[in-house]
């Protein structure tokens, strides 16, 4: 699908010099939360309105100062290139912002017609726009066109951790390695950065709800950013619990499958599953007939997944065990895990380090590994 024909037909930007500044996403979020749902209105003319704000094809936000110079970003200035991925809730395309030449990830989310679903969409925008962290994918702007909201997101040119695993598998097989997963320190570099994002979200009372390798993105500099926070809530509202269960169940914490709400520790379980999958090269339940049966087994005393002894360090095994405690009350926290030796030993140099320095060290070492393994860059 090309968005270009649609974009070309758009009116010129309404945000030229001298015009009144449109409300920022933060204003929108506040309105969405504080006003009654009945004030939503989706007009025939292609404007999504609520209370005092509008989302038009010409854009809505004034947030980009934090994330680069996109103060004049409009949909008609974007050329869509190829799809980056398709999820249950929409497609992400690579797009070029023609005036600056900058690449973006443009995510289309179809807006359902009920008030609840539009609320969810606004909640996602609120969440995305109010966060600013080096390990979260930034929202640059958002647009409404023909029943869909388009989110312009920072582009991560290294793909996802899921893609990295697939790219690495033939390398490991070629080297006749016993396991096809990523080297343990590499998993540590990615996990430390993901933990930094999770600790940031959890510190603000936000649960990600969909931590999985496909949502952990990399760039060629070794930076790792978590994507899609807030999305799974929208999925549930849109397709119902059964659909979102199909999409992401294999990373889902046992308490969630037995009907309890997501909590911050549910994200920590999912991260533990990600670590096992990335280190071993296969999802721990890949061969299972029924994930549901496995989870029921866990609740009745079966051992949670672990890293096999002898193939992995004691630190990595302990990290996974701390994430994959069946009782959510006993799981480690994202904040605490940032100081776990598995996450930080491989990224620091042994001297005392701040979390920010550890994240920078993790990115630096990950970039070196990417360059040594796949070529390009500055090894
Ligand atoms: N896939 C989904 N979101 C993406 C992003 N921001 N960058 C690259 N690929 C993506």
Image (cartoon, rainbow, N blue to C red):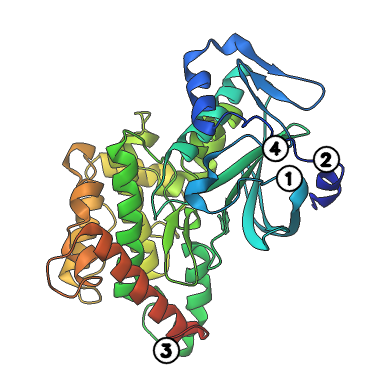
Identify which residue, 217 or 128, lies in the foreground. 128
Marks 4 and 1, the one that precedes in the sequence: 4
Q: Position of residue 93 (x, y in %)?
A: 68, 55
Q: Do the CB atoms of the residues marked 1 and 2 lie less than 8 Å apart?
A: yes
Can I make out residue 198 in this image?
A: yes
Q: Quadrant of ligand 1?
A: bottom right
Could you give the CA–CA distance between mark 3 and mark 1, rounded to whole angstroms? 48 Å
Q: Quadrant of the C terminus?
A: bottom left
Q: Which residue is mark 1?
A: 75
- The residue sitting at 22% across, 48% down in the picture is 335
Which of the numbered marks, if any, corresponds to residue 176? 3
Circle 2 or circle 4, nearest the eye = 4
Q: Quadrant of residue 24?
A: top right
Mark 2 or 4 closer to N-term? 2
The answer to whether the residue labelled 3 contacts the one labelled 2, judged by CB atoms less than 8 Å apart, is: no
Q: Disc 1 on helix, strand or loop?
A: helix
Q: Are marks 4 and 1 in contact (CB under 8 Å)?
A: no
Find numbered disc 2 in the image and state the secondary structure of the residue it sits on: loop
Q: Residue at the far front: name it.
A: 18
Mark 3 Cα within 10 Å, few/some/many (few <14, many 20+)?
few
User: Is the residue at mark 2 in contact range of ligand 1, meaning its CB lies under 8 Å from it?
Assistant: no
Q: Position of residue 71 (x, y in %)?
A: 61, 45
Q: Is residue 180 left or right of residue 31?
A: left
Residue 10: mark in rendering:
2
Name the N-terminal-most of marks 3 and 4: 4
The secondary structure type at the circle numbered 4 is loop
**Label 4, on which residue?**
15
Q: Nearer the viewer, mark 3 or mark 4?
A: 4
Between the residue at mark 4 and the residue at mark 1, the CA separation in whole angstroms equals 12 Å
- Of mark 1 and mark 2, the one earlier in the sequence is 2
| Cα separation between marks 1 and 2 | 8 Å
Label 4 beta carbon less than 8 Å to ligand 1: no
């Amino acid at each position: 699908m090309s968005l270009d024909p649609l974009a070309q037909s758009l009116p010129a930007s309404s945000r030229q010099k001298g015009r009144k500044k449109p409300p920022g996403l933060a204003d929108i979020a506040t309105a969405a939360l504080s006003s009654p749902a009945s004030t939503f209105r989706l007009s025939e003319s292609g404007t999504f309105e609520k209370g005092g704000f509008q989302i038009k094809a010409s854009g809505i936000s004034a947030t980009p100062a934090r994330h680069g110079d996109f103060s004049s970003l409009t949909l008609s200035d974007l050329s869509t290139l190829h799809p980056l991925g398709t999820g249950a809730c929409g497609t992400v395309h690579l797009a070029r912002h023609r005036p600056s030449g900058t690449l973006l990830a443009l995510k289309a989310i179809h807006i359902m017609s009920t008030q609840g679903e539009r609320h969810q969409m606004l909640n996602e925008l609120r969440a995305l726009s109010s966060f600013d962290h080096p390990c979260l994918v930034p929202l640059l702007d958002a647009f409404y066109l023909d029943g869909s909201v388009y989110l312009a997101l920072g582009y991560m040119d290294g793909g996802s951790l899921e893609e990295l695993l697939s790219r690495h598998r033939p390398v490991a097989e070629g080297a006749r390695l016993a396991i096809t997963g990523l080297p343990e320190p590499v998993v540590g570099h990615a996990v430390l950065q993901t933990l930094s994002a999770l600790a940031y979200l959890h510190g603000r009372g936000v649960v990600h709800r969909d931590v999985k390798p496909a949502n952990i993105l990399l760039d060629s500099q070794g930076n790792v950013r978590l994507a899609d926070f807030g999305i799974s809530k929208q999925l549930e509202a849109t397709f119902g619990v059964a659909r979102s269960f199909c999409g992401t169940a294999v990373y889902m914490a046992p308490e969630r499958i037995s009907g309890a709400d997501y909590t911050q520790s549910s994200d920590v379980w999912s991260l533990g599953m990600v670590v096992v999958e990335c280190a071993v090269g296969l999802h721990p339940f890949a061969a299972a007939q029924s994930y549901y049966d496995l989870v029921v087994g866990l609740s009745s005393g079966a051992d949670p997944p672990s890293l096999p002894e002898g193939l992995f360090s004691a630190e990595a095994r302990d990290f996974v065990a701390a994430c994959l405690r069946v009782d959510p009350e006993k799981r480690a926290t994202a904040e605490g895990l940032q100081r776990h030796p598995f996450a930080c030993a491989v990224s620091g140099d042994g001297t005392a380090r701040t979390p920010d320095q550890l994240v920078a060290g993790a990115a630096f070492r990950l970039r070196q590994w990417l360059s040594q393994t796949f070529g390009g860059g500055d090894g």
